[in-house]
Amino acid sequence: MQLFTLTLLSCALALGCSTNKPANDPGPAQKAGAAVDEGAHDAKESAKDAGEKAGEATEKAGEKLQEKSD
């Protein structure tokens, strides 16, 4: 009886721990890392856009100053 119970428990444990997820699927740490990388990329692009807009505004201000001094 004990052998049967032990076998049944082992089978239940094996089935409970099994998963259909492939071994190479990204885990929580990899998903979090990818999200951080994407956020950093988005921040870099936003900073680049802001820099370009600031440069354009500075150029326009310089042109207006030049017009006033002429």
Image (spheres, rainbow, N blue to C red):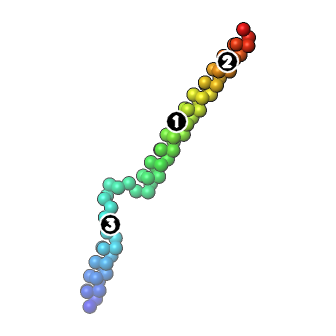
Q: Amino acid at mark 1?
A: Glu
User: Furthest residue to the top?
Assistant: 70
Horizontal side of 31 relative to 57 (left or right) equals left
Q: Position of residue 59 (x, y in %)?
A: 63, 20
Quarter of the figure with the C terminus: top right
In three-dimensional space, the C-alpha distance between marks 2 and 1, rounded to whole angstroms, equals 26 Å
Q: Amino acid at mark 2?
A: Gly
Mark seen at residue 45? 1
- Look at 64% across and 25% down and name the residue there: 57
Task: Quickly name the residue at label 2.
Answer: 62
Name the residue nearer the viewer: 50 or 70.
70
Quarter of the figure with the N terminus: bottom left
Name the residue nearer the viewer: 38 or 15.
38
Number of labelled discs?
3
Q: Amino acid at mark 3?
A: Thr
State whether residue 16 is above or below residue 36. below
Q: Position of residue 32 (x, y in %)?
A: 47, 52
Do callouts 2 and 3 mark residues in contact (Cβ within 8 Å)? no
Mark seen at residue 19? 3
Q: Secondary structure at mark 2?
A: helix
Q: Would you identify the image quadrant in which residue 64 lies?
A: top right
> Which tag is nearer the camera, tag 2 or tag 3?
2
Q: Position of residue 65 (x, y in %)?
A: 71, 16
Q: Secondary structure at mark 3?
A: loop
- Look at 34% across and 73% down and name the residue there: 16
In three-dimensional space, the C-alpha distance between marks 3 and 1, rounded to whole angstroms, equals 39 Å
State whether residue 5 is above or below residue 53. below
Horizontal side of 4 relative to 46 (left or right) equals left
Q: Label 2 neighbourhood size at 10 Å, few (<14), some (14-19), many (20+)?
A: few
- Look at 34% across and 70% down and name the residue there: 17
